[in-house]
Amino acid sequence: MLLLARAARAAQQASDAGLVDLGLTSAQAGVLFAVPKEGGVGVSAIAEQMGLAQSVVSVLTQRLVEQGFLARAPDPDDRRAVRLSLTAAGATARAEAARRARGLNTRITREFSAAEQAAIARFLEGVIGLKEVGDD
């Protein structure tokens, strides 16, 4: 697991470095990826999708609102909640962040066969599944 933790840190650092000119961190880009292209979503749904605490996502989304990448609107079903949606700037930043993420993935996996990439994906899904088992 030490190797996995080191790889995760290296991947996050590389991703963060590749997004700095967009004014994003990899965590903020993850939030943009979790917001649907059309319509809105609540903070709790983003937190669930990303596997993060709602309080962490609240801080991330607040910064994205301040940067003009997300817009807040009242949730019509719950007066206490808000719905977040992409702004035009957010959609542009999301598309560019996704393009850069694909490039980073290509750099990382270019020496692996399709079968090896599938095995790595299965392994990572299994690691993610450990948390889900622990949540029960």
Image (cartoon, rainbow, N blue to C red):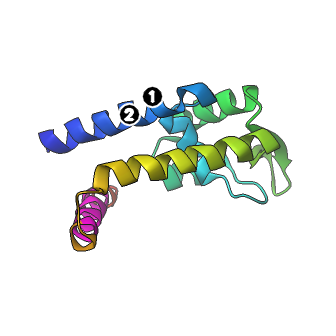
Inspect the image, locate mark 2, and give the three-letter code of the amino acid beneath it: Ala
Tell me where residue 124 sits by quadrant. bottom left
Q: Horizontal and vertical percent for residue 36?
A: 69, 58
The residue singled out by tag 1 in the image is 17
Inspect the image, locate mark 1, and give the three-letter code of the amino acid beneath it: Ala
Q: Are marks 2 and 1 in contact (CB under 8 Å)?
A: yes
Taking depth in this image into account, of 106 and 27 the one nearest to the observer is: 106
Residue 52 vertical position relative to residue 39 in the rendered view, above or below: above
Residue at the spot 72% in from the left edge and 41% down from the top edge? 90
Identify the element where label 2 is drawn.
helix
Q: Is residue 122 magenta?
A: yes
> Is residue 74 rendered to the left or right of residue 37?
right
The residue singled out by tag 2 in the image is 14
Residue 65 vertical position relative to residue 92 in the rendered view, above or below: above
Residue at the spot 46% in from the left edge and 43% down from the top edge? 52
Q: Horizontal and vertical percent for residue 48?
A: 51, 53
Q: Residue furthest left?
A: 2
Residue 111: image tag: none
Q: Is residue 104 magenta?
A: no
Q: Horizontal and vertical percent for residue 17?
A: 45, 28
Residue at the spot 72% in from the left edge and 58% down from the top edge? 37
Q: CA distance from mark 2 to mark 1?
A: 5 Å
Which range is magenta?
117-130
Assign the C terminus to one quadrant of the image: bottom left
